[in-house]
Image (spheres, grey):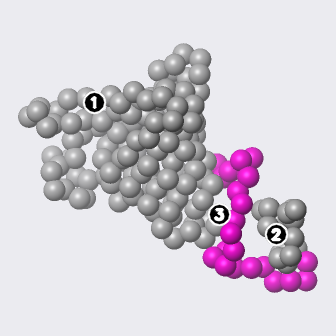
Amino acid sequence: MTSHVEGFHPDLPDADGDSPALPLRTRVHHIRADALDGDTAQSGGMRRFAAISGRTVGSERIWMGQTHVAPATASSDHHHGASETAIHVVSGHPEFVFLDDSDGAPQEIRLRTSPGDYIFVPPYVPHREENPSPDEEAVVVIARSTQEAIVVNLPALYVLGHGDDAGEQR
């Protein structure tokens, strides 16, 4: 049995009674699917929703949520600052696009995914997400190594310089 506050155990005091509110970092949190926070950093063509963040649960080193990419849509080119980003494809077939110059000249690389696949985006790597399906929304779950969703929108993709940890263009 759970109480009405975030699915907490019924033996824990609720914040709405005479008991003081428990500090965010002293309890386990339950974030219901219908309670995701849409007040997040955004890129064109995508909707990001926070589940786990500094604001929602007091996390200090992780952010987790989901992103919805509408049919026949591409995000803006962007990177996520110093944050490492892990992505799990829940539905649809989103594509992740970045530039690579390991063959000497920059070329666009397109990673085509399916439900159940994972993607890792290192810090500062410029990329974009695309959903080529004309009628199916793509949904992914995202985890980041920062407490909030950092999104730096860019005018274009570029190859991240070798040994360049500041994310500057070459």
Q: How crowded is the residue under tag 1: few (<14 C-alpha within 10 Å), some, or many (20+)?
A: some
Q: For marks 2 and 1, give the one nearer the viewer.
A: 2
Local SS, label 3: helix
Of 113 and 37, nearer the camera is 113
Residue 17 vs residue 77, the one in the foreground: 17
Q: Amino acid at mark 1?
A: Ile
The numbered mark at residue 56 is: 3
21 versus 65 height, above or below = below
Mark 2, residue position: 9
SS type, badge 2: loop
Q: Position of residue 128 (x, y in %)?
A: 39, 36
Q: Which mark is residue 145?
A: none
User: Mark 1 or 3 closer to N-term?
Assistant: 3
Q: Earlier in the sequence, mark 3 or mark 2?
A: 2
20 in the magenta segment: yes
* Residue 69 locus on image (x, y percent): 54, 32
Q: What is the spatial separation of the Cα atoms under label 2 and label 1, in whole angstroms?
A: 48 Å
* Residue at 55% in and 44% down: 141
Q: Is residue 71 visible?
A: yes
Q: Residue furthest right?
A: 17
The region drawn magenta spans 17-39
The residue that label 1 is drawn on is 109
Residue at the (52%, 19%) spot, across then down: 133
Q: Secondary structure at mark 1?
A: strand
Amino acid under disc 3: Thr
As measured in the structure, the alpha-carbon distance from the residue carrying label 3 to the one carrying label 2 is 19 Å
Residue placed farthest to the top in the image?
A: 134
In front of the other: label 3 or label 2?
Answer: 2
- Inspect the magenta stretch and tell me whether residue 67 lies in it: no
